[in-house]
Image (spheres, grey):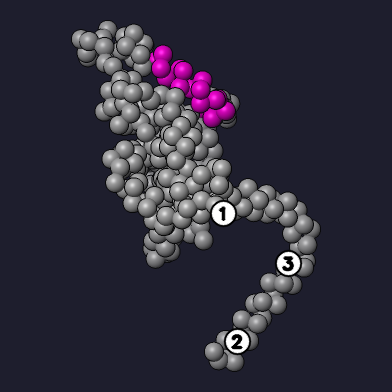
Amino acid sequence: MSKTTAGRVQGNKKGFWRTLGRQWQLVIMSVPMLLYVLLFNYGPMWGWITAFQDYKPKLGITGSKFVGLDNFKWLFGRDDFLQSIRNTLAMSTINLVLGTIASIVLALLLNEVMNTMFKRTVQTVTYLPHFLSMVIVVGMAQNIFASTGPINTLLMNMGVIKQPIFFLGEGGYFWWLVGFINVWKEVGWNTIIYIAAMTSIDPCLYEAASIDGAGRFNKIRYITLPGIKSTFVILLIMNIGHLMEAGFEIQYLLGSSLVMDFSQTIDIFVLKYGISKQQYGVATAAGMFKSIVAIILLFAANTMAKKLDESTLI
């Protein structure tokens, strides 16, 4: 390392500690949250050792037999675990695509509305479902998509179908039902982020575009969408990191034995084998696999964004 480089590194270190000293109040305020994360997010990770054991609660971690990678080999030899990976990725991808498109479209439409009262009303109505319990949401979905529910009744009255469609009992519909329910529940909440990004765009750009004769669609294409690109990339990176988390509540509550091959996610698999069958080592191995893949996806998405000179999370 040259003297110039060494001096620059030393200067950066001094600058970091100097800045930290000037912001000691903020540092103190962050300590409780840091302790919370260490205690409840990183502390339990020592239990990952049970993924390499034939764990017995009576013997504990120190007394349980070490089995190496046997739990992982057993997992990947199970068809139901491979199905749970498929279901998790499929539903996560559907949720990501539908949720992102719906949020951006709704934000663009609201951004073009000039009536403030109407805009606030629509925002309120669309984000209120975010606060509903998933139990309530699934109960509503079961009534709406039932054989005698309003969806089937409407389709039959319009002559689209002759017999009711068994939405809740056919696996081919399950992934899309989950996707549309998640969009309805979260689209308003996610829209807030994009609207906030749109408000930071310089109004002078729109004025200049109007002078040049640009219409609304061209303003959206050349000003609004590029203006929210960095926000979109950051959210996309974060969502890709959650691709292994398709959810638990909605699949557990909406699923049944008829659609088990399409509804079981990794989280439900962990609950099934960890709690019901008390195979703790296998359940821990499944959860560990999900976490590791999520971390890999997060860093891969972040690296790809960095190579494309886009905004990055890390």
Give whichever of 296, 162 is nearer the camera: 296
Does residue 75 sit above or below 163 in this rendering? below
Task: Please name the residue shown 55% across and 91% down the image.
Answer: 2
Give whichever of 33, 158 is nearer the camera: 33
Whether residue 1 appears in magenta in the rendering, the answer is no
Residue identified by numbered label 3: 20
- Under mark 3, the amino acid is Leu
Task: Please name the residue shown 59% across and 50% down the image.
Answer: 44
Which is more foreground, mark 3 or mark 1? 1
Whether residue 135 appears in magenta in the rendering, the answer is yes
> Alpha-carbon neighbours of circle 2 within 10 Å: few (<14), some, or many (≥20)?
few
- Under mark 2, the amino acid is Ala
Residue 281: tell me if it is visible: yes
Q: Which residues are magenta?
A: 126-144
- Under mark 1, the amino acid is Thr
Q: Position of residue 135 (x, y in %)?
A: 51, 22
Mark 3 or 2, nearer chain start: 2
3 and 1 marks in contact (CB < 8 Å): no
